[in-house]
Amino acid sequence: MKFEKVIIEKGENHVATLTLNRPESMNTFSSQMAAELNQALIELDSDSLVRVILLKGAGKAFCAGIDVNELAGKTAIEYREWIEKMEHPLVTISKLKKPVIAQLHGVAAANGMGLIAAADLVIAADNARMGLTAINVGLNCVGPVIPVSRCVGRKKALELLLYGNLIKMPEALSLGLINKIVPKDELESQALQWAEELAQKSPIAVQIAKTGFYHSEDMNYEEQFAYMNEAFARLCTTDDAKEGVTAFFERRDPVWQEK
């Protein structure tokens, strides 16, 4: 698929950078960008040279939500199909084997905040803000609040959903919405460094860990242990698991074969 509204860049470090590319509209989701983002995520997950996906936005903002220019003149069925397309990338991230790190600058609003919450990990500039802001224009963020609620819990998720306030990064960090805050002028370098560090880990171990985490998240306590123990047992049979332990005892860096 040829991409116009997202940009893919691949380095030799096993990190692929995926950039939302509608800077003139603060990277708001158009139907085209939503479809391209979803397809790009799937293609990168299938790329044998990619171990980590770094997701960011071009221009002044990460993503300001959904482009309301597409809102008018639809039937109820068309609205359903339209919004499902907008939310599809948020679901897809949880189905990928490879981790997605979001690099947050400027503002992440509405579906942009949902995308941040859906990412596996988030590194943010110290002056960034985020919020489920659609309530302020007579809409709501009932889709984006789903991944948000899994980060922050019921009461805070409802507050964010119903009031639509933008929050700053110290609060976002305390709520579990992001992992790291860095100075804005160091965001690019530190985000790439963090992604490269993760890409050095055993790809099989990382992918089994992520897949197991999402698949077992809604299981009951005992079922989750059973599922995770089976996942760990499968990992132990791989060549890379044996290589990692051998390298540890030999005090050298492991060489991953991804098998």
Image: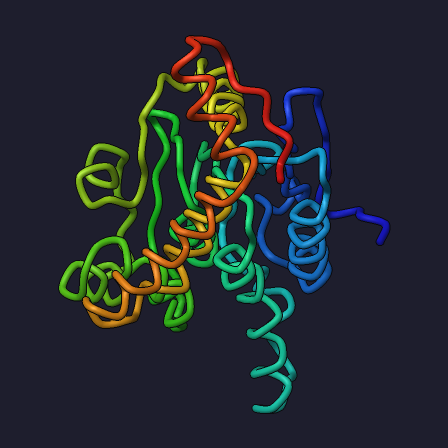
Nearer the observer, 122 or 212: 212
Residue 83 shown left or right of residue 112 in the figure: right
Is residue 56 visible in the rendered image? The answer is: no
- Residue 150 on image: x %, y %: 28, 60
Is 154 on the left or on the right of 71, as rendered?
left
Residue at the image point whose x is 47% and y is 21% from the top:
197
* Nearer the observer, 42 or 2: 42
Q: Residue furthest top?
A: 251
Scheme by which the image is coloured: rainbow
Residue sitting nearer the eye, 31 or 208 = 208
| x then y, percent, for residue 42 | 67, 54
> Which residue sits at x=40%, y=51%?
233
Q: Position of residue 177 (x, y in %)?
A: 29, 45
Residue extending farthest to the right is: 2
- Whether 223 is drawn above or below 153: the answer is below
Q: Quadrant of the N terminus?
A: bottom right
* Residue 203: quadrant of the picture: top right
Dividing the image into 4 quarters, which one contains the C terminus? top right
User: Can residue 114 be seen in the rendering of this structure?
Assistant: yes
Residue appearing at x 54%, y 28% in the figure: 199
Q: Is residue 107 left or right of residue 60?
A: left
Given residues 63 and 42, the one toward you in this image is 42
The correct choice, above or below, for 138 with respect to 52 in the image is below
Which residue sits furthest left?
155
Tell me what residue is drawn at x 38 percent, y 49 percent: 232
- Using the image, determine if residue 157 lies above or below residue 44: below
Q: Is residue 160 left or right of residue 239?
A: left
Where is residue 162 shown, x and y percent of the image?
24, 67
